Image (cartoon, grey):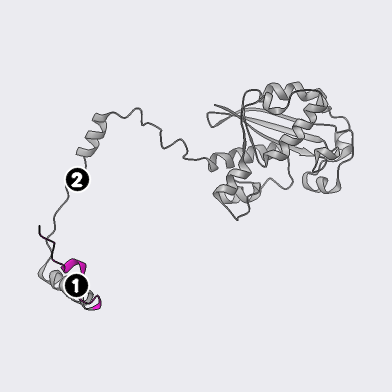
Amino acid sequence: MRQIILDTETTGLDPNQGHRIIEVAAVEMVNRRLTGNHLHRYVNPDRDIDVGAMQVHGITPEFLQDKPRFSDIAQEFIEFIQDAELIIHNAPFDVGFLNMELRRLEKAPLSNWCGDVTDTLAMAKALHPGQRNNLDALCKRYGVDNAARTLHGALLDCELLAAVYLALTRGQESLSIGLEARSGQASHTAALARPRPILVQASPGELDAHNNLLDTIAGESKGTCLWRMEPETT
């Protein structure tokens, strides 16, 4: 199973208002193991960056002046994510921006190039309702070291999200692991290996204490102590 953990940074919050992608990162995971393959590109948006956005990711227009446009990296990006499941935190945000960039180039939307999109924010909200579920909070909750994350950065966030995703989904496959390999003989052997139960007789003192407890229960229940009721005969 091939999965791509993906993240973007942008000039602002709304692609419908002309905001653009300025950084995209994608990290490959196969059979729940990072392969070391990744894609990471800064992108010149040909527009200003909102001050609030710069405070989040620290990327300036000056830094992006000599970087490629999205049109220059679009095919490389498509080939990297093709046929994989995408793992994204707050997926509607990134998918909205990516689809807008693809639309500008008259290319098909993201769903034409990749498999399913899994939103880890939605997963976390379902598992931890009423709690903070941003990436920093999830790193703390699952013991993922995010000390290097002083600002948002697409590649670092992908690597952190990969660890968080594995923690969020840990055990989903474990229920079926090895079941097909277990034979009836193995189950029978395991049952035979269980120790025989040991019958321990109550001492006279323990019997007296038990009867005293039943007397108390009978008194408080007006004689309807279940353990002293005579069984019905037929």
Report the span colored magenta: 220-234
Vertical comparison of 197 with 27: above or below: below
Vertical comparison of 163 with 206: above or below: above
Between the residue at mark 1 and the residue at mark 2, the CA separation in whole angstroms equals 32 Å
Amino acid type of the residue tagged 1 in the rendering: Leu
What residue lies at 89% left-to-right and 40% top-to-bottom?
48
Which comes before the other along the chain, label 1 or label 2?
2
Amino acid type of the residue tagged 2 in the rendering: Pro
- SS state under label 1: helix
Q: In which quarter of the image is the N terminus?
A: top right
- Dominant SS type (magenta): loop
In the displayed image of the protein, which residue is found farthest to the front?
A: 234
Q: Mark 2 points at which residue?
A: 195
Q: Quadrant of the C terminus?
A: bottom left
Residue 120, position in %: x, y? 61, 41
Tell which of 102 and 50 is nearer to you: 102
Tell which of 134 and 16 is nearer to you: 16
What residue lies at 72% left-to-right and 37% top-to-bottom?
94
Query: Which numbered mark, 1 or 2, is in the foreground of this view?
Result: 1
Vertical comparison of 30 with 166: above or below: above
Tell which of 81 and 38 is nearer to you: 81
